[in-house]
């Protein structure tokens, strides 16, 4: 592990162009076309390796009128400069344009092989295209999302990693990821706030090294619990946590702050990051800003992983209207974060 880390640092110092694994995601969704649109810009800042169903990606490139140099390879390795490496996954055959067994296996295999390459040190960072959780779960029972899958593959518990969404105006860390609402209260613990806040501080310092982060802790209950009248989580967990962590981190911590105002204040520039108590508390304000403006970053992994903020969008696949902006942001963020870590 030490030698691998030294090699990565030397590579960063010499070229600052990481080997970037890109997974196509669901080939029957918009993944192929948005990735095809991003390959030229990705090759300017990284050495990309695409994992996914090759005939589908080839069709997407043809539809765009793009003709990059492609090298197909059975096992991931960086191609020569200016050449896009592709590791084909799934069965050969015609492009995949509908959900089903072929689509499920192609996207699951792409994710598996890309993570293998990151863990082996072949790839420096990972940008994932949108997958169909339902389709993958049919062949991989228990799969509920990238974040949980990546933690497991890295030998980590789900609570060891944090889902953070970063945009120009709003950065939000999630206390819990894909948890049903009837179990959300069980996730409100000091340990999870400790982990999430620590990852938020680390990310903000990596992306903005000259700035002391200002972080707000969003309340769990309406009106921050009204002194216990509307819930006890604030008085029993959040207030003691905020008092304690202010003494231990190099960041300005505010909270617990009512959730109906904290996101507005963050977007106006008062805070650099917000810790949200549950998934939709974070995602509603983020998605009100518009699709394609936010990058999903998984903190706590041994490698950089990012993804766009949208799903597979089957309803617009192959129509030519899918916007690649979110995927392009994810690729740019992966490279920027890798550079910050490699040069640090």
Image: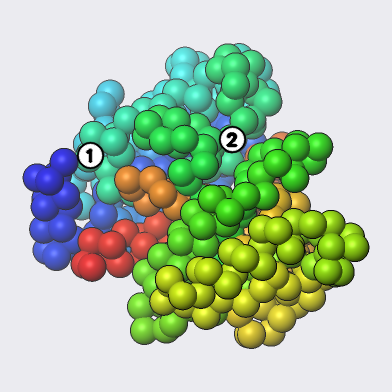
Q: Is residue 14 visible?
A: yes
Name the secondary structure under disc 1. loop
Mark 1 or 2: in front is 2
- In percent of the image, x 31 and y 59: which residue is there? 338
- In percent of the image, x 62 and y 65: which residue is there? 240
Q: Label 1 neighbourhood size at 10 Å, few (<14), some (14-19), many (20+)? A: many
Is tag 1's residue or tag 2's residue first in the polypeptide sequence? 1
Residue 137: x and y in percent read: 62, 21
Cα distance, mark 1 to mark 2? 23 Å
- In percent of the image, x 14 and y 65: which residue is there? 13
Q: Is residue 5 left or right of residue 55?
A: left
The C terminus lies in which quarter of the figure? bottom left
148 to 8, vertically: above or below: above
Name the secondary structure under disc 2. loop
Q: Which mark is residue 122?
A: 1
Describe the colour scheme in one phrase.
rainbow
Q: Which quadrant of the figure has residue 74?
A: top left
Q: Which residue carries the number 2 mark?
A: 145
- In percent of the image, x 44 and y 30: which residue is there? 152
Q: Is residue 11 left or right of residue 22?
A: left
Q: Is residue 58 left or right of residue 336?
A: right
281 to 107, vertically: above or below: below
312 to 220, vertically: above or below: above
Residue 308: x and y in percent read: 56, 53
């Amino acid at each position: 592990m030490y030698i691998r880390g030294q090699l990565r640092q030397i590579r960063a110092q010499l070229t600052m162009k990481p080997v970037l694994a890109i997974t196509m995601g669901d080939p029957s969704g918009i993944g192929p076309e948005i990735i095809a649109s991003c390959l030229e810009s990705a090759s300017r800042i990284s050495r990309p390796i695409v994992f996914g169903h090759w005939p589908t990606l080839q069709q997407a490139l043809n539809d765009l009128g793009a003709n990059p140099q492609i090298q197909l390879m059975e096992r991931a390795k960086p191609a020569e400069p200016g050449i896009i490496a592709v590791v084909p996954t799934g069965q050969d055959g015609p492009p995949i344009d509908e959900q089903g067994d072929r689509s499920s296996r192609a996207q699951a295999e792409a994710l598996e092989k890309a993570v293998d390459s990151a863990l082996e040190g072949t790839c420096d960072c990972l940008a994932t295209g949108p997958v169909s959780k339902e389709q993958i779960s049919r062949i991989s029972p228990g799969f509920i999302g990238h974040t949980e899958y990546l933690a497991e593959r890295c030998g980590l518990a789900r609570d060891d990693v944090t889902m953070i969404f970063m945009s120009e105006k709003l950065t939000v860390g999630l206390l819990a990821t894909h948890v049903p609402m009837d179990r959300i209260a069980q996730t409100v613990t000091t340990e999870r706030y400790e982990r999430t806040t620590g990852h938020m501080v680390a990310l903000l310092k990596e992306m903005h090294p000259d700035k002391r982060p200002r972080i707000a802790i969003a309340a769990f209950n309406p009106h921050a619990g009204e002194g216990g009248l509307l819930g006890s989580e604030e008085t029993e967990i959040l207030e003691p946590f905020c008092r304690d962590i202010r003494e231990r981190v190099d960041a300005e911590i505010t909270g617990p702050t009512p959730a109906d105002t904290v996101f507005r204040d963050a977007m106006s520039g008062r805070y650099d990051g917000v810790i949200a108590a549950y998934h939709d508390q974070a995602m509603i304000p983020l998605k009100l800003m518009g699709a394609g403006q936010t990058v999903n970053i998984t903190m706590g992994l041994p490698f950089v992983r990012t993804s766009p903020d949208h799903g597979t969008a089957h309803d617009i696949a192959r129509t030519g209207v899918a916007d690649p902006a979110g995927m392009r942001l994810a690729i740019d963020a992966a490279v920027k974060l890798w550079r910050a870590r490699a040069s640090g």
